[in-house]
Image (cartoon, grey):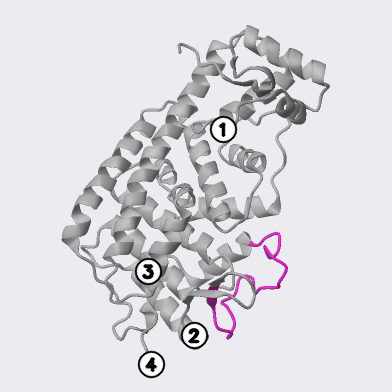
Amino acid sequence: MASTWIWQQPDWPQFRWKGSALEPLLEQARAARQGLLSRLETLEPPLDREAISALLGRESLGTAAIEGELLDPGQVRSSIARRLRLPLAEGQPAASAQVEGLLDVLLEATSTLDEPLTLATLNHWHQRLFAAGPDGLRAIRIGELRDGAPMQVLSGAIGRERLHFEAPPRDQLKEQLEAFLDWVASPPAQLDGLVRAGLAHLWFLTLHPYEDGNGRLARAITDRLLAQDCKAQAQQALSGRALGISAQILRERQGYYTALERCQRGDLDVTGWLSWFLEQLSAAAGTNGAVIDAVQRKAAFWWSHRHSGFNSRQQKLLNRLLDAEPEGFTGGMTLRKAIGLTKVSRATAWRDLAELVELRAIEPIGEGRSRAYRLHWPGL
């Protein structure tokens, strides 16, 4: 049989890599992650939970969006706030079964770190991912391994599909999945925890054990191993939830798929994949640091306006702007967007915005029809 795929190599899954190539990337990732954790551990309650909430929200939205599933950010924030015992904003929507199921998986993955990862655990997570039913129109097996049909990753129009990957056949799957789970439970003693997470991500996606949801499960497993590495470094368990990589993968989604495909079509030298993975861990730590900055700025903003007396509509507009940090609210807050968010007349929305400018909560950008508004940060 021709060795088209990595799992067809005769010594699969004996991965190998060039340690000298990974060493500087490992050092960089370790330093970036340690810096992020140190910042988190200096936050006083409830800012620490606010930061975890913001980071977990981005990870939840990111891991779903990679697969083309766009969750309601308000529902995600509502569910996380309830779970972390944070105050709920007025009018926050109740979370759907889909949102609750995904958060169940992500939080369980990073909290039950001493329990073994088993096939029963994976099947349970798969059931929770599809608590609201299949994502698409076709029926899938939920909470069970895929059937005997070839598992292929395709793209393109019907009749002109491009084959990106084909997973091992069903008759090999259970044995291979057991080998994977045994390795997760008892990895080589000298294996670096970050390398372990990268290998597990690639290995699980290569097995592709379910008909759908494999990417979200792979990222949950990766989060789990990253949190275990954090725990091994004597860091707080809560902080481990801030070390996910899904939001970063979403930003580099095309590079993600390219790195995976290149590796899965190659031999068992996975240096290229691990290099890409470690680079993303460093980048994720930097971006998550910016999220912590935004949480601190948000707290300072509300403190500076504790006597401003915003009405409920103005609070909703400000929360929408603040929730978009650190990237910022695309295009700024326009009069039309304000009307859409608050469901009031043009005159009322205009008055709300004008009062916010007068209170130095927002400031105008642009003129005429292009006029929009952005936050006015205290002290800036």
Magenta stretch holds residue 134: yes
How far, Cα to Cα, is label 1 from label 3? 34 Å
Is residue 201 at least partly visible in the picture? no
Determine which residue is flagged by label 1. Answer: 324
Is residue 85 at least partly visible in the picture? yes
**Circle 3: residue type:** Arg
Determine which residue is flagged by label 3. Answer: 262
Foreground mark, 2 or 4? Answer: 4
Above or below: residue 354 compared with residue 283: above
Above or below: residue 348 compared with residue 56: above
**Circle 4: residue type:** Met
Residue count near mark 1 (Cα–Cα under 10 Å), binned few <14, some 14–19, many ≥20: few
How far, Cα to Cα, is label 2 from label 4? 13 Å
Is mark 2 in CB contact (under 8 Å) with mark 1? no
**What residue appears at the point 51 percent right and 16 percent down from the top-left corner?**
377
The percent position of residue 271, horizontal first and vertical second, equals 26, 64
Q: Which residue is more in the foreground, 216 or 264?
A: 264
Determine which residue is flagged by label 4. Answer: 1
Name the dominant secondary structure of the magenta segment: loop
How far, Cα to Cα, is label 3 from label 2? 20 Å
Determine whether the residue tagged by mark 1 lies in a helix, strand or loop.
loop
Bounds of the magenta segment: 130-153
Determine whether the residue tagged by mark 3 lies in a helix, strand or loop.
helix
Q: Earlier in the sequence, mark 2 or mark 4?
A: 4
Give the label on residue 358, or none: none
Q: Is residue 352 left or right of residue 107?
A: right
Q: Earlier in the sequence, mark 1 or mark 3?
A: 3
The percent position of residue 256, horizontal first and vertical second, equals 43, 58
Task: Indicate the quadrant containing the C terminus: top left, top right, bottom left or bottom right.
Answer: top left
**What residue appears at the point 66 percent right and 54 percent down from the top-left corner?**
98
Above or below: residue 44 compared with residue 137: above
